[in-house]
Image: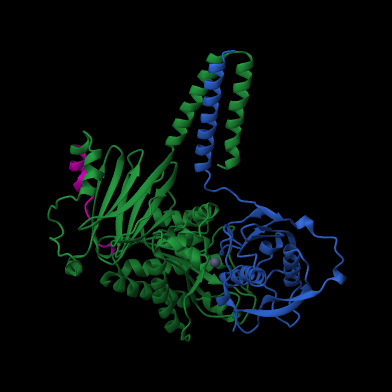
C-alpha cells in the first residue's frame, strides 16, 4: 500500500464534509465519520504492531514482545542465536526501544514466506531461555540466562539459575502492575513453551535440495546444446539418494521433474518443511569458454559495511550509529530486511559452503578455490543455512561433456554429501 | 449554522485526517521512492567540444580469468553527473578498446537513467540484456557488477545501483542474480 493511497480516503472525507455541511445534514456527516473511525479501527487490527523492549535483571535478560492481539509463536535456538517466529496474518510493524544488555547483543527482523522472524543475538553461546505469555496487554516474555559454567564470572555471585528469585522492583512494576484476572491462566501456560534443546540434537530433520531452473527456465546452455536444468535434476536426485541411504534425514526436492518452480516457492518449500539445510544445485556459465571448476556460494547481503552493521541487525543504539540514521533511512532498513530471512544465517551458511567447497576441490584436484558470495534471489528468503553450488561450467566444452556422464554426476553428489556430513559434525559439537 | 457545531465537526475532520494519514503511512513500508534529482531528459544543450574531459574507469571481463578488469576512458567533464554517468554506461556498451570481453550482451541499449537524492542510480536497459544473456552465475555476476562498479567507482554521488529491464523491476537478471534490490559495488571481483 503506497502512501499515495492514504490521500484518497482523506480527500473523500473532505468531500463528504463540505457536501454534508452545505446541506446541513450534520447527522449524516457524524454517521459517516463514525463509520470511518470504525473502518480505521478495523483496518488497524490487520496491521499488527509489536513493541519490543529488552531489560536486564539480576539473573537474566528479559525480552518483552508486546502486541495488541495474542500471537502464535515458536522459538528455536542456534547456539547464540534465538529465532522467534510469528505466523504472519497481515502486516507487522515493529517498534523497539533502545537497549543496553549484557545478555542480548542485537536484534534482527526478517520476513519468511509465511511468517515473520525476530532474531535475538545473545552475547555468547549456549545461553538457556524460558518463555511465557502474559495478557493485558498481550506479551511474550523471553528470559535469557547465561550458561551454567559462566555463572561464576558474574559479579556479584548469584544463586543457581532456575531457583525462584525475588523480583527486582523494576520487574515488579513491569509484571505485577499490569496484572490482570488472566494472570492465573498465564501461569498455567508457561510450561507450554519449554526451552528447546540446541538445534543439533533436536531439529536436524529435513534437508531441502533445489535442482536449479526447470520448465521454461532452462538456465545456462552449453556449446553442444546441453541445458542447465537437465543437469541439476539428476545431480540433485543422486544427492538425495546418497543422503537418504546414509543419514537419518528426510530429503525434499524443490522439483523432481522438468517443471517451472518460482524462486519464491523454492524458498517456501524449505521454510514450510522447516528445512535444516538448503542446497541449491546449479551449473555455471561464463563468456570465456576456458572458465572451469566448481564454486560454492552463499548469499551476500548486498549492504554497505555501515548498513550491514546497523541494518542486518538493528544494533543497540550506540549513539554514533544512531545519529547517522535519518528518518528516511529507516525506510531502507525495512526494505533491506524485507524477505531477507537468510540474513540471520550468513555465518552458518558460509561454514556449510566452506565444507562443501573443500570436498569439491579434492574431487576435482582443484587448487584451493575459495567460497564466494553473490546476491542470489533463491537464497534470500531461506530461513536456515543455505548455499548454492555451481558444479562445473557448462560453457566449457570439456566440462559440459563431463557433466553429462553419470559417473561425474555421482562423484559430485558424493562430494556435496561429504561436505554436508562434515558441516553437520562440526555443527553439532559447537 | 451553529458555530460551535462547525468547530466540533472540523475538529473531527482534522482528527480523522490525522488518523488516516498515520494509518496509511505505517502500512507503507514498501514505498517506492523516486526522488528524482536530475532526469535523463535533462540531457543538456551545452556544446560538448567546449568542455574539458575527465578520465574514468570502466570494467570489462577478460579471457584469462573470471575477474573484472579496469580500462581507462576519457569522457566529457559535463557539469551534470547524470550526463557523465550516461556517457560511462554508453562507453561500457561500446565495448573494450583493448580486447577485453564485453560484460553485457552486445545488442543491449541504455533506455533511461536517473539518480535519486539518496545516491541510488536507476539504470534501465533494453530487454536484450536478459534475452541474449548467456545466463549462469559467473556470467551474470560479470554483467551486473561491471555496471555497478563502473557507476559507483567513478561517481561519488552514486552508492547503489538499481538495474531495471525494459522499464521495470525484474526478479533476477537471467535466473540467478537478484535485481529486486539496489546493489552495492563488489571491488573484490576486480583483478589486482
Ligand atoms: Zn543456474
> Position of B91 compared to A389: left or right?
right
**Chain B image colour:** blue
Residue B20 seen: yes
Ligand 1 falls in quadrant: bottom right
Q: Colour of chain A?
A: green
**In the depicted structure, whether residue A324 falls above or below residue B99:** above
Is B107 positioned to the left or the right of A27 in the image?
right
Percent position (x, y) of residue A387? Answer: 44, 68
Q: Residue at x 52, y 34 (%)?
A: B18
- x and y percent of residue B70 in the render? 66, 79
In this view, the residue in front, B137 or A66, is: A66
Quadrant of the image containing the C terminus of chain B: bottom right
| Segment colored magenta | A185-199
**Majority secondary structure in the magenta region:** helix
Magenta span contains residue A186: yes
Q: Based on the picture, tell me whether residue B181 belongs to the magenta stretch.
A: no
Is residue A300 visible in the rendered image? The answer is no
Closest to the observer: A197 or A9?
A9
Q: Farthest residue to the front: give it.
A: B3
Expressed as whole percent of the image width and height from the top left, the position of residue A371 reads: 47, 76
Return the residue nearer the eye: B90 or A309.
A309
Residue shown at the point (24%, 44%) measured from the top left: A173
Amino acid at each position: 500500500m503506497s502512501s499515495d493511497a492514504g490521500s484518497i480516503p482523506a480527500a473523500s472525507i473532505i468531500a463528504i464534509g463540505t457536501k454534508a455541511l452545505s446541506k446541513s445534514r450534520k447527522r449524516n456527516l457524524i454517521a459517516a465519520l463514525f463509520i470511518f473511525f470504525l473502518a480505521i479501527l478495523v483496518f488497524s487490527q490487520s496491521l499488527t504492531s509489536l513493541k519490543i523492549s529488552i531489560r536486564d535483571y539480576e539473573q537474566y535478560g528479559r525480552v518483552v514482545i508486546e502486541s495488541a492481539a495474542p500471537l502464535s509463536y515458536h522459538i528455536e535456538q542456534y547456539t547464540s542465536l534465538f529465532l522467534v517466529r510469528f505466523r504472519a496474518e497481515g502486516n507487522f510493524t515493529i517498534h523497539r526501544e533502545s537497549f543496553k544488555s549484557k545478555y542480548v547483543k542485537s536484534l534482527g527482523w526478517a520476513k519468511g514466506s509465511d511468517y515473520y522472524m525476530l532474531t535475538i543475538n545473545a552475547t555468547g553461546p549456549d545461553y538457556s531461555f524460558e518463555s511465557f505469555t502474559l495478557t493485558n496487554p498481550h506479551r511474550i516474555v523471553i528470559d535469557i540466562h547465561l550458561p551454567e559454567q559462566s555463572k561464576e564470572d558474574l559479579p556479584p555471585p548469584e544463586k543457581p539459575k532456575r531457583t525462584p528469585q525475588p523480583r527486582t522492583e523494576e520487574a515488579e512494576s513491569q509484571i505485577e502492575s499490569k496484572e490482570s484476572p488472566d494472570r492465573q491462566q498465564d501461569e498455567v501456560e508457561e510450561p507450554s513453551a519449554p526451552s528447546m534443546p540446541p538445534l543439533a540434537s533436536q531439529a536436524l530433520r529435513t534437508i531441502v535440495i533445489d535442482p536449479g531452473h526447470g520448465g521454461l527456465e532452462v538456465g545456462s546452455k552449453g556449446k553442444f546444446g546441453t541445458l542447465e536444468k537437465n543437469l541439476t535434476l539428476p545431480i540433485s536426485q543422486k544427492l538425495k539418494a546418497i543422503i537418504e541411504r546414509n543419514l537419518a534425514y528426510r530429503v525434499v526436492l524443490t522439483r523432481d521433474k522438468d517443471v517451472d518452480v518460482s524462486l519464491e516457492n523454492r524458498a517456501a518449500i524449505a521454510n514450510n518443511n522447516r528445512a535444516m539445510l538448503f542446497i541449491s544445485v546449479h551449473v555455471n556459465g561464463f563468456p570465456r569458454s576456458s572458465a572451469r571448476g566448481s564454486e560454492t556460494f552463499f548469499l551476500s547481503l548486498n549492504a554497505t559495511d555501515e548498513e550491514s552493521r546497523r541494518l542486518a541487525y538493528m544494533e543497540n543504539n550506540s549513539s554514533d550509529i544512531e545519529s547517522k540514521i535519518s528518518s528516511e533511512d529507516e525506510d531502507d532498513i525495512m526494505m533491506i530486511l524485507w524477505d531477507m530471512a537468510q540474513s540471520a544465517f550468513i555465518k552458518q551458511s558460509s561454514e556449510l559452503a566452506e565444507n562443501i567447497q573443500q570436498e569439491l576441490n579434492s574431487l576435482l584436484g582443484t587448487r584451493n578455490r575459495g567460497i564466494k558470495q553473490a546476491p542470489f534471489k533463491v537464497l534470500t528468503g531461506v530461513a536456515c543455512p543455505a548455499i548454492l553450488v555451481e558444479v562445473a561450467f557448462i560453457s566449457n566444452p570439456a566440462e559440459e561433456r563431463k557433466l553429462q556422464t553419470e559417473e561425474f554426476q555421482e562423484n559430485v553428489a558424493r562430494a556435496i554429501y561429504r561436505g554436508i556430513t562434515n558441516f553437520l559434525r562440526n555443527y553439532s559439537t559447537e | 449554522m451553529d458555530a460551535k457545531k462547525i468547530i466540533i465537526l472540523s475538529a473531527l475532520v482534522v482528527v480523522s485526517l490525522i488518523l488516516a494519514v498515520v494509518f496509511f503511512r505505517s502500512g507503507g513500508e514498501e514505498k517506492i521512492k523516486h526522488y528524482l534529482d536530475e532526469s535523463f531528459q535533462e540531457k543538456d544543450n551545452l556544446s560538448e567540444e567546449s568542455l574539458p574531459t575527465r578520465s574514468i574507469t570502466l570494467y570489462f571481463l577478460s579471457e584469462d580469468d573470471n575477474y573484472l578488469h579496469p580500462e581507462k576512458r576519457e569522457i566529457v567533464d559535463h557539469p551534470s553527473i547524470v550526463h557523465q554517468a550516461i556517457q560511462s554506461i554508453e562507453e561500457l556498451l561500446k565495448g573494450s578498446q583493448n580486447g577485453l570481453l564485453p560484460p553485457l550482451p552486445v545488442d543491449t541499449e541504455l533506455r533511461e537513467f536517473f539518480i535519486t537524492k539518496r545516491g541510488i542510480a536507476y539504470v534501465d536497459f533494453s530487454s536484450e540484456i536478459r534475452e541474449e544473456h548467456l545466463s549462469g552465475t559467473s556470467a551474470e555476476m560479470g554483467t551486473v557488477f561491471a555496471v555497478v562498479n563502473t557507476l559507483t567507482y567513478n561517481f561519488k554521488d552514486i552508492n547503489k545501483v538499481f538495474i531495471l529491464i525494459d522499464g521495470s523491476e525484474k526478479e533476477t537478471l537471467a535466473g540467478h542474480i537478484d535485481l529486486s534490490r539496489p546493489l552495492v559495488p563488489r571491488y573484490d571481483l576486480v583483478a589486482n
